[in-house]
Image (spheres, rainbow, N blue to C red):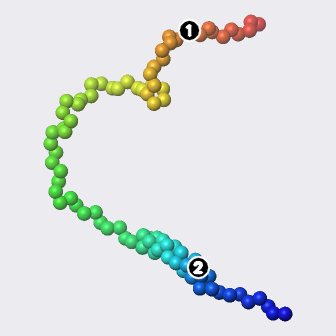
Amino acid sequence: MRSKQIAYTPDVVWEAIFLLVILKIPIVYLCFVVYWAIKAEPKPFEPALKTAPLGVDPRPGRSRSGPRRPRRGPHGAPSRTYPRTARAAARTPAG
């Protein structure tokens, strides 16, 4: 009796190469980026070459006149539309 032989066709070989080698490239790249980020030293801040001029407020006529009223309810819903009613006091048992 003859044993069954396994035939490695070119399609099977290229599939194995693709799975075992080509798909590992993104993983190697990720490891390189993480290693580079860990080993990198921060650069010192560079001073500004030109300072920003301090001039007039770019929004003229926009001044605040007192505190703002708080928003009512979630998402600024309008206030109540019904009047409040007085609640009756709870009675305590006599005794």
User: For the residue labelled by badge 2, is the local secondary structure a helix, a strand or a loop?
Assistant: helix
**Amino acid type at mark 2:** Glu
Image location of residue 80, percent across then percent down: 48, 17
**Residue 14, visible in the rendered structure:** yes
Label 2: how many Cα within 10 Å (few below 14, some 14–19, many 20+): few
Residue drawn at x 62%, y 82% as measured from the top left: 12
Q: Nearer the viewer, residue 59 or 24?
A: 24
Q: Which mark is residue 36?
A: none
Quarter the C terminus occupies: top right
Quarter the N terminus occupies: bottom right
Residue drawn at x 59%, y 82% as measured from the top left: 11
Q: Earlier in the sequence, mark 1 or mark 2?
A: 2
**Amino acid type at mark 1:** Ala
Q: Is residue 68 above or below residue 16?
A: above
**Residue 35, visible in the rendered structure:** no
Distance in Å between CA atoms under marks 1 and 2: 81 Å
Left or right of 64? Residue 80 is right
Q: Which residue does the numbered mark 2 point to in the structure image?
A: 15
Q: Which residue does the numbered mark 1 point to in the structure image?
A: 86
Q: Are marks 1 and 2 in contact (CB under 8 Å)?
A: no
Left or right of 18? Residue 50 is left
Residue drawn at x 59%, y 10% as measured from the top left: 87
